[in-house]
Image (cartoon, helix red, strand yellow):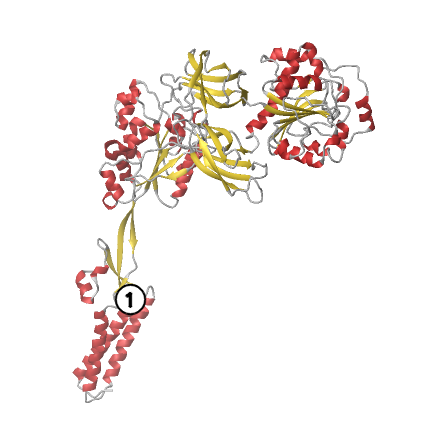
């Protein structure tokens, strides 16, 4: 409809959008037979007007009658036009722009620095805008190559993708995240500050590899789901093809093909077998004594090095404390290690004698090799607590048994042990033995808690009360004390069945039923045949029973040991315990279980040992060394539990000792006052100390409701290596802070480095299944051209604009009616 007639009708032309097409339409026009009805109706009305005006007064001139008839017909025609709804139809042409998804791999494998050969290095350098010398001499990480590609030629790669549609950038690893980057908005560059920034050549934010795994399937599926209902021209994936997640990448590619979304992977990385040298594991005792040597072993592995010799060094560093600065590292020893075969495995052992007490971190380190793939795994550390203070031992015996006499002498003679003896059968006027002589059996909890280990040798129950047993349970379970119980034929049954002392059963790692008359009779019988003890698999390498470092020599020593005559009957061992030694008499087996002779267990924070026979003194026939070694190692094993549990004021616990970088570390602490009552503070400070030169992490632990003395909290493991968790209690009467500590190890997750090669085959298969195409990094400039043009042009019809309700049309109707009324009035017509 021409603009002339629209202006005649008084239609506002501003209501028509720029570039729109217009068309005149009737919104209520009749169709089919309705057209004939309308025409008939109009004709009938026109005839009716004609007839009426023929019958008007004869005084009225014919010309006036004709004029009035024409006016009335015109009014009828205007009403018919209004009834049919004249309108202006407006239609617009719009272009629908598709999305182009750009997926960037931010998993930890993207932190690898690949060492390319000269030809490949030149191609990579050209693709990302770096020099060949830079790529070879100081190779960037895989993530660094991605950043360089996005920055090259002022973001040309991104601009080319933008020509294919609106670019949505996401990073993926174990999850999918929308990436905020300059120049990646969906609007034209002239309308957004981000795009304007890209046009000026400002860099996009760098890619930070942090994901602990890579799930290609999840990345594809979730990116498709996030744009459901929108056209997607293609998905461009930049990564190394690592897939360590649980989904099926090829099934995800099939899903993309079903939705007509091709995948265009760009491979980053080196597909060749890598070279890597790694310290796999380090072993050392948790506790060592100043002046006593201990052994530290490390297991090394080498890939891609062939037959190579490397130097391994043992480094010592004292951990930081509240009142002192950390000491510098010192190299204790270096050893040559040779690998044979591929991949190579080797073990190196160091022997070290600590001279001063303290908390030490021992690190086994190998120097990085040329072109090595990953250098962060060339060392591994372990924490050893070196103590000089004597272990406080309370030795309680019901009578001077054959084991009591040499054990008392041994513990008094050992310089690392401070023993207090309490022989219950001694005359009250006689002096007890020991390094620290006591005049009475401890009867208060704070007196008992001063000791590290309590040893019972067939004790007499007469001196013990229910309160003593409750204090003993707290000593072991809450304060990490050690307990050794040696059964005997004289008092043990009475102790285990007495109503005041039977609670000691809960501490012992063996099940004890009701004792029958036959059991009591066997306990008092004389046994004439010795039965050799059977060392179990758990006991063969246990520190208590290791009398020689050579496993074969150790086994021969135990085979030569004198046998066992008397032993205490049990119903078996409790779940979660470790049976180290068993009786070899088949007649004493119960339900396919040998009678246990030596059992170790954990009760709360403390360690317990059960010794079911009373003849270790017979081992002295082979020389006192084995008897002494067994008992000293047993005491040290129990003392270690106390030392690692934070001594007497509390302990810190985590659900494990090894964490991946970035993981959340839950921390629980049990803390006590100087009087060994549960601490009642609402919060306590937590300090996490890392490597020298790093800032400590300061946090707090909050009290757990309805659990006095228990505190909980958490922190993020943001530093690699050994971290020391420390709670400083500043309420000690001495005025010095009491430190409750625990060590954990934080390392780089290994799953991303198990096979760090570029998985070109997987990326190519995904591209083929989705009807896309795989590109090497030097072909990145061809990606945009390969993405199909999915722009669509659609016609959008707006609601028709009415023309019958314009001012001029309605005014015309009013004018016609007014003229008719005036003429009739002038001619005195009805």
Residue 199 position by quadrant:
top left
Residue 741 horizontal/vertical position (percent):
51, 31
Query: From the viewer's perspective, is 189 left or right of 698?
Result: left
Q: Report helix, strand or loop for mark 1.
A: loop
Which residue is at 61% across, 27% downward? 452
Is residue 764 among the parts visible in the rendering?
Answer: no
Residue 283 horizontal/vertical position (percent):
52, 20
Figure check: 490 above or below 735: above
Residue 157 horizontal/vertical position (percent):
27, 34
Q: Residue furthest bottom?
A: 59
If the image is split into quadrants, where does the N terminus sit?
bottom left
If the image is split into quadrants, where does the C terminus sit?
bottom left
Query: From the viewer's perspective, is 775 left or right of 671?
Result: left
The residue at which mark 1 appears reads as 85
Q: Nearer the viewer, residue 368 or 213?
A: 368
Q: Nearer the viewer, residue 575 or 731?
A: 731
Residue 776 position by quadrant:
top left
Query: From the viewer's perspective, is 710 left or right of 97?
Result: right
């Amino acid at each position: 409809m021409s603009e002339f007639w629209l202006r005649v009708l008084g239609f506002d032309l501003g209501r028509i959008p720029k570039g729109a097409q217009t068309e005149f339409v009737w919104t209520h026009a009749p169709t089919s037979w309705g057209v004939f009805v309308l025409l008939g109706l109009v004709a009938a009305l026109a005839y009716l007007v004609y007839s009426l005006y023929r019958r008007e007064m004869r005084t009225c001139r014919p010309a006036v009658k004709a004029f009035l008839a024409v006016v009335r017909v015109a009014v009828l025609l205007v009403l018919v036009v209004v009834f049919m709804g004249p309108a202006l139809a407006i239609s617009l042409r719009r272009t629908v722009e598709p999305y182009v998804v750009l997926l960037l791999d931010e998993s930890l494998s993207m932190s690898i620095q690949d060492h390319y050969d000269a030809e490949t290095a030149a191609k990579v350098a050209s693709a990302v805008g770096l020099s060949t010398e830079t790529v070879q001499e100081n190779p960037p990480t895989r993530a660094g190559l991605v950043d360089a590609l996005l920055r090259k030629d002022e973001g040309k790669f991104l601009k080319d993708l933008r020509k294919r549609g609106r670019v949505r950038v996401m990073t993926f690893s174990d999850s999918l995240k929308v990436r905020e980057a300059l120049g990646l908005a969906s609007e034209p560059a002239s309308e957004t500050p981000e795009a304007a920034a890209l046009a000026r050549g400002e860099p996009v934010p760098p890619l930070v590899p942090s994901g602990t795994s890579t799930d290609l399937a999840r990345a594809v599926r979730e990116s498709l789901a996030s744009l459901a209902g929108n056209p997607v021209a293609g998905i461009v994936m930049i990564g190394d093809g690592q897939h360590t997640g649980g989904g099926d990448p090829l099934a995800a590619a099939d899903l993309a093909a079903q939705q007509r979304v091709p995948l265009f992977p760009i491979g980053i990385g080196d597909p060749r077998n890598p070279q890597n040298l790694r310290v796999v594991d380090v072993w050392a005792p948790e506790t060592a004594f100043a002046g006593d040597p201990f052994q530290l072993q490390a297991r090394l592995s080498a890939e891609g090095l062939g037959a190579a010799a490397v130097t391994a060094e043992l480094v010592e560093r004292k951990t930081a404390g509240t009142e002192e600065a950390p000491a510098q590292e010192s190299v204790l020893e270096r050893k040559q290690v040779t690998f044979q075969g591929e991949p190579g495995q080797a073990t190196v052992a160091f022997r070290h004698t600590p001279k001063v007490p303290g908390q030490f971190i021992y690190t086994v380190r190998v120097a990085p090799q040329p072109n090595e793939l990953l250098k962060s795994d060339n060392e591994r550390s372990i924490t050893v607590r070196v103590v000089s203070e004597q272990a406080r031992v309370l030795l309680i015996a019901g009578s001077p048994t054959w084991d009591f006499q040499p054990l008392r002498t041994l513990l008094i003679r050992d310089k690392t042990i401070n023993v207090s003896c309490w022989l219950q059968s001694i005359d009250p006027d006689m002096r007890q033995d020991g390094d620290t002589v006591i005049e009475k059996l401890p009867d208060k909890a704070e007196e008992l808690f001063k000791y590290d280990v309590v040893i019972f040798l067939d004790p007499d129950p007469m001196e013990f009360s229910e309160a003593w047993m409750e204090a003993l349970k707290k000593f072991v379970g809450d304060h990490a004390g050690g307990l050794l119980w040696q059964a005997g034929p004289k008092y043990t049954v009475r102790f285990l069945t007495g109503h005041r002392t039977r609670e000691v059963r809960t501490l012992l790692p063996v099940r004890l039923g009701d004792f029958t008359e036959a059991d009591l009779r066997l306990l008092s019988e004389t046994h004439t045949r010795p039965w050799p003890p059977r060392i179990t698999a758990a006991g063969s390498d246990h520190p208590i029973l290791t009398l020689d470092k050579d496993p074969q020599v150790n086994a021969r020593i135990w085979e030569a040991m004198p046998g066992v005559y008397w032993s205490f009957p049990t119903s078996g061992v409790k779940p979660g315990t470790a049976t180290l030694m068993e009786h070899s008499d088949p007649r004493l087996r119960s339900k396919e279980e040998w009678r246990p002779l030596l059992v170790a267990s954990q009760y709360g924070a403390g360690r317990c040992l059960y010794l079911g026979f009373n003849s270790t003194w017979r081992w002295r026939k082979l020389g006192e060394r084995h008897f002494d070694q067994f008992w000293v190692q047993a005491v040290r094993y129990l003392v270690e539990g106390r030392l690692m549990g934070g001594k007497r004021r509390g302990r810190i616990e985590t659900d494990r000792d090894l964490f991946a970088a970035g993981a959340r570390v839950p921390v629980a602490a049990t803390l006590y006052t100087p009087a060994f009552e549960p601490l009642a503070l609402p919060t306590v400070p937590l300090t996490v100390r890392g490597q020298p030169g790093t800032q400590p992490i300061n946090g707090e632990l909050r009290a757990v409701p309805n659990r006095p003395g228990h505190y909980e909290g958490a922190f993020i493991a943001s530093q690699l290596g050994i971290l020391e968790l420390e709670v400083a209690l500043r309420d000690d009467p001495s005025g010095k802070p009491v430190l409750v500590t625990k060590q954990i190890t934080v390392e780089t997750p290994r799953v991303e480095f198990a096979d760090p090669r570029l998985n070109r085959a997987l990326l190519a298969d995904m591209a083929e299944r989705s009807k896309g195409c795989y590109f090497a990094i030097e072909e990145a400039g061809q990606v945009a051209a390969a993405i199909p043009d999915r722009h669509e042009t659609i016609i959008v019809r707006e609601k028709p604009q009415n023309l019958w309700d314009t001012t001029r049309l309605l005014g015309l109707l009013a004018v016609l009616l007014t003229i008719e009324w005036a003429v009739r009035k002038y001619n005195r017509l009805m």
